[in-house]
Structure formats: structure tokens, C-alpha cells
């Protein structure tokens, strides 16, 4: 059975340590061969846009663009439908490799057999 990890990150630049922790855990898991699904919700939704991750700074933390590349290399990134709509973000706006999906898909992923879900 493949190990699977679903991570929902609710923080962005408003809570940089929590945000960085979520992306770091997701990237390390993906690099370790774990199937990762990272969900961007709340203020982290902005990181679905090209260039926005490069604006994020946190001392002693890996650069967010590098973490995103690692996650996309071994997993997927999803932007919450409602969070995107509240920020006027559309499919045409997001980075390549990022999808937009809603709570039904999140619940389906999180409730699948063999999945560990984390929320930051």
C-alpha cells in the first residue's frame, strides 16, 4: 500500500512559521516517496499564483518556491474553490500544476484508506 498524506495549510504570510511548516512537511514527505496532496486554503491561497511564493520570507526556512517544486515533483497542490473565489482567483491565474477543487474532493482524499491528514 502506498503511503498517502493530505495536508491542509490555512496560513500564509499572516502566520509564516505555520505556513512554512506545512510546505516543509509536504516537500519532505514527497521527497521520501509519500504520495502528497497539499491543499491551499485561507491566506495560503495566494501561493497558488505565479511569483507569490518568491515574496515569502522566513529566516532559516527553505525558500517556498523550492518547496513547491518538490511537492509538485512528487505530489499535487490544490487550491480550495471557495478560497479562490473569495480572492477572485481563477484556473487561468494559478501556477502550472495547481488545480482548484472543493470540500467534496478534500473529504474524499482525506477519508481514503491509508491516508494521514494534517492541518496547519
Image (cartoon, rainbow, N blue to C red):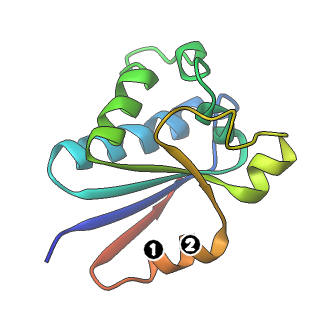
Q: Compared with residue 85, is residue 49 higher up or lower down, i.e. above or below? A: above
Is residue 86 left or right of 84 when viewed as pictured? right
- Residue furthest out toward the front: 92
Element assignment for label 1: helix
Q: Identify the residue at image location x=50%, y=18%.
A: 58
Q: Residue at x 34, y 71 (%)?
A: 116
Mark 2, secondary structure of its residue: helix
Residue 25 lies left or right of residue 98; in this view the side is: left
Residue 68 found in image quarter: top left
Query: Residue at left 33%, top 75%?
Result: 115
Q: Position of residue 85 (x, y in %)?
A: 82, 50
Location of mark 2 (residue) = 105
Name the residue tied to disc 1.
109
Q: Is residue 6 above or below residue 93?
A: below
Label 1: how many Cα within 10 Å (few below 14, some 14–19, many 20+) = some
Question: Residue 3 at x, y = what percent?
Answer: 20, 68
Amino acid at each position: 500500500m502506498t503511503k498517502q498524506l493530505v495536508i491542509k495549510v490555512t496560513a500564509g504570510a499572516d502566520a509564516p512559521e505555520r505556513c512554512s511548516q506545512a510546505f516543509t512537511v509536504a516537500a519532505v514527505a514527497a521527497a521520501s516517496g509519500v504520495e502528497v496532496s497539499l491543499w491551499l486554503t485561507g491566506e495560503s491561497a495566494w501561493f497558488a499564483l505565479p511569483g507569490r511564493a518568491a515574496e515569502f520570507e522566513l529566516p532559516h526556512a527553505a525558500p517556498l518556491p523550492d518547496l513547491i517544486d518538490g511537492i509538485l515533483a512528487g505530489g499535487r497542490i490544490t487550491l480550495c474553490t471557495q478560497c479562490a473565489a473569495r480572492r477572485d482567483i481563477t484556473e487561468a491565474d494559478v501556477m502550472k500544476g495547481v488545480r482548484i477543487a472543493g470540500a467534496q474532493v478534500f473529504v474524499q482524499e482525506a477519508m481514503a484508506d491509508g491516508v494521514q491528514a494534517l492541518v496547519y
